[in-house]
Image (spheres, grey):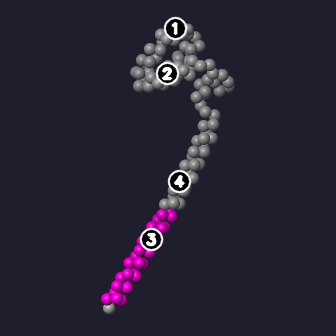
Amino acid sequence: MEHIIQEIKTSFSTCTPDELQARIPIWRDQFRNKGISITALETLLNFFQEPHPTGTSGADEAFVDPHLDERVKDFRSIVSRMERDNTELKRQAAKWRTFFFVALAAIILLFICVAVIVVL
């Protein structure tokens, strides 16, 4: 796959538009044979068709978002906080459930006592 991508990349810098048009069906067949969506090929063609500034990182890393690590850390902290909140809420729900059943048992016991006193 990397070989095909490298071929597409170099073809844009060395081939004429007519030669590129002739190579597209070949690349399409290669993508189909590998089981990769043709949309991926279209995305690659669109990406390499547009000029990109070449810095120290190179054009291959243009897909990488520089703020991705920060966003991943933010999402992980949000997920961690939500998991802690979920655990706390489950603990509180269990406490209230226990309180409810104890109170229900006390009320039933009280009614039984009142019924026994009234019957006697």
- Of residues 91 and 117, the one nearer the viewer is 117
Separation of residues labelled 2 and 1 (CA atoms): 17 Å
Q: Amino acid at mark 2?
A: Glu
Mark 4 or mark 1: which comes first in sequence? 1
**Mark 4 sits on what residue?**
83
Mark seen at residue 34:
none
Q: Indicate the position of residue 8 as horizontal and vertical percent values.
A: 53, 17
Separation of residues labelled 3 and 4 (CA atoms): 25 Å
Give SS at disc 4. Answer: helix
**Mark 2 sits on what residue?**
42
**Mark 3 sits on what residue?**
100
Q: Is residue 43 visible to the viewer in this orientation of the structure? A: yes
* Mark 1, other Cα within 10 Å: few <14 / some 14–19 / many ≥20: few
Give SS at disc 3. Answer: helix
Mark 3 or mark 4: which comes first in sequence? 4
- In the picture as drawn, the residue positioned furthest to the right comes out as 56
Tag 4 and tag 2, C-beta contact below 8 Å: no
Q: Indicate the position of residue 34 as horizontal and vertical percent values.
A: 42, 23
Residue at (34, 85) in percent of width and height: 115
For this view, does 72 lie left or right of residue 22?
right
Tag 3 and tag 1, C-beta contact below 8 Å: no
Separation of residues labelled 4 and 2 (CA atoms): 40 Å
Separation of residues labelled 4 and 1 (CA atoms): 57 Å
Q: Main secondary structure of the magenta part?
A: helix
Separation of residues labelled 3 and 1 (CA atoms): 78 Å
**Mark 1 sits on what residue?**
18
Q: Is 3 covered by the magenta stretch?
A: no
The part of the chain drawn in magenta is 91-119
